[in-house]
Amino acid sequence: AQSVSQHNHHVILSEAASLELGCNYSYGGTVNLFWYVQYPGQHLQLLLKYFSGDPLVKGIKGFEAEFIKSKFSFNLRKPSVQWSDTAEYFCAVNEGGGSYIPTFGRGTSLIVHP
Amino acid sequence: GAVVSQHPSWVICKSGTSVKIECRSLDFQATTMFWYRQFPKQSLMLMATSNEGSKATYEQGVEKDKFLINHASLTLSTLTVTSAHPEDSSFYICSARADGDNEQFFGPGTRLTVL
């Protein structure tokens, strides 16, 4: 079974700081990769996804992620965070062409100070 | 994007009662629906996967007799927590996926509190 690791469990930043959240997975085959955000008291929303093609993926709200196959990584980045980015961020992976059952990382709690 | 709804959004019940949670795909046909449980400040734990018209596949450690899942139509799946106890209190989230789609769409979740 595959696993998904998010190395940063808690991140605290000031507004305008740059953000990078790590995500690594263990599956060696074709994968589909996702980043979700969960704002306080709200449901999961898709930030961005990678299925194939350009490994640099741009999502909503200025987020982007880069798929590096050799490193089994899909790190999330944002050049300048805002207070409104305070939320939980989850990386998820499913096996492309398989059952599409996703595996989630344990999440990263991001707090942005104004 | 595709919309998934859940009902109710929150429920409080007495210990020993059963609670049914509905998950609906509003604008697409969901051949597969997933049920998750989320504890505070933790990740989503997949409980089971249900395919329309067949029995759900439960993850290891999830009691299928306690968490009854029905996926009778392409737009509706239900999760029934039977004989609920306080330790069943949690946030239950469903998601849905259309046939051949790589992506799943999440419902807003249901907060269950068992007194």
Image (cartoon, coloured by chain):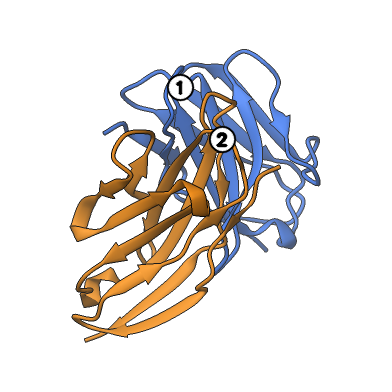
The image quadrant of residue B100 is top left
Asked if residue B44 is positioned above or below residue B100 in the image, the reply reads below
- Residue A37 appears at what percent x and percent y? 37, 58
B101 sits to left or right of B60 = left
Q: What residue is disc 2 on?
A: B34
Which type of secondary structure does the marked residue at label 2 adopt?
Answer: strand
Marks 1 and 2: same chain?
yes
The chain holding disc 1 is B
Split into 4 quadrants, where in the image is the N terminus of chain B? top left
Q: What residue is disc 1 on?
A: B30
Which type of secondary structure does the marked residue at label 1 adopt?
Answer: loop
Chain identifier, orange in the render: A
Asked if residue B18 is positioned above or below residue A83 in the image, the reply reads above
- CA gap between label 1 and label 2 equals 10 Å
Q: Going 31% across and 31% down the picture, which residue do you hit?
A: B2
The chain holding disc 2 is B
- Residue A50 appears at what percent x and percent y? 37, 40
Numbered mark located on residue B54 in the image: none
**Amino acid type at image mark 1:** Ala
Split into 4 quadrants, where in the image is the C terminus of chain B? bottom right
Chain identifier, blue in the render: B
Crowd tier of the residue under label 1, counting other residues whose Cα lies within 10 Å: few below 14, some 14–19, many 20 or above: many
Q: Going 55% across and 40% down the picture, which residue do you hit?
A: A102
> Is residue A26 visible from the viewing direction of this image?
yes
**Amino acid type at image mark 2:** Phe
Asked if residue A12 is positioned above or below residue A49 in the image, the reply reads below
Between B92 and A21, the one lying in front of the other is A21
> Is residue B11 visible from the viewing direction of this image?
no
- Residue B80 appears at what percent x and percent y? 65, 37
B45 sits to left or right of A37 = right
B46 sits to left or right of A107 = right
